[in-house]
Image: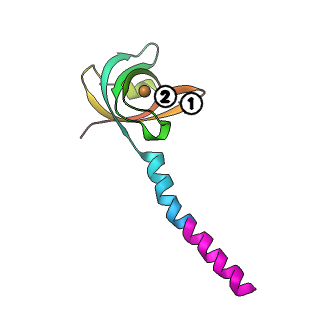
Amino acid sequence: MIARALRLLKIVCLAVALALPAAFAGATELAEGEVRRVDVETRKLTLRHGPIANLGMGSMTMVFQVADTRLLEGLKPGDRIRFRAERVGGQFTVVAVEPAP
Ligand SMILES: [Cu+2]
């Protein structure tokens, strides 16, 4: 009885250990994009972007809200970036930006 419970526990632990890195990768994955328009006053960033896995979104051009205007510093149309977008209060929001490699 105890041996069986321990075996089950071991299987559960293994499953969690295997699932964690995948969840972490999904949480930090960056999407690719090209800057089309930067609007500091309204905190908006228009991007032509590739697939965004965590939002289940395909490629398109769209306007994002930006979590912090500091993310817009130095960005100009034509720049290629990698970014992280999330749904914040029902709005698609860019929460991290870095230059494309
Ligand atoms: Cu989109």
Point out the stretch of residues depicted in magenta: 1-15
Check disc 2: other Cα within 10 Å, few if <14, some if 14-19, many if 20+: many
The percent position of residue 50, horizontal first and vertical second, equals 34, 33
**Residue 52: quarter of image:** top left
Image quarter hosting the N terminus: bottom right
Please, what is the dominant secondary structure of the magenta stretch? Answer: helix
Say if the magenta span includes residue 9.
yes
* Residue plotted at (37% across, 25% down): 60
Residue at the far right: name it: 1
The percent position of residue 77, horizontal first and vertical second, equals 27, 19
> Which residue is labeled 1 in the image?
88
Q: What's the amino acid at mark 2?
A: Thr
Is residue 96 shown above or below 64?
Answer: below
Are the residues tagged 1 and 2 within 8 Å (C-beta)? yes
* Residue plotted at (50% across, 53% down): 23
Say if the magenta span includes residue 6.
yes
Using the numbered discs, state the Cα–Cα distance from disc 1 to disc 2 in whole angstroms.
6 Å
Name which of mark 1 and mark 2 comes first in the sequence: 1
Number of numbered callouts drawn: 2
Tell me the tag on residue 29.
none
Image quarter hosting the C terminus: top left
> Which residue is labeled 2 in the image?
93
The percent position of residue 56, horizontal first and vertical second, equals 48, 37
Q: Is residue 63 shown to the viewer in this render? A: yes
* Residue plotted at (28% across, 20% down): 76
The percent position of residue 30, horizontal first and vertical second, equals 38, 41
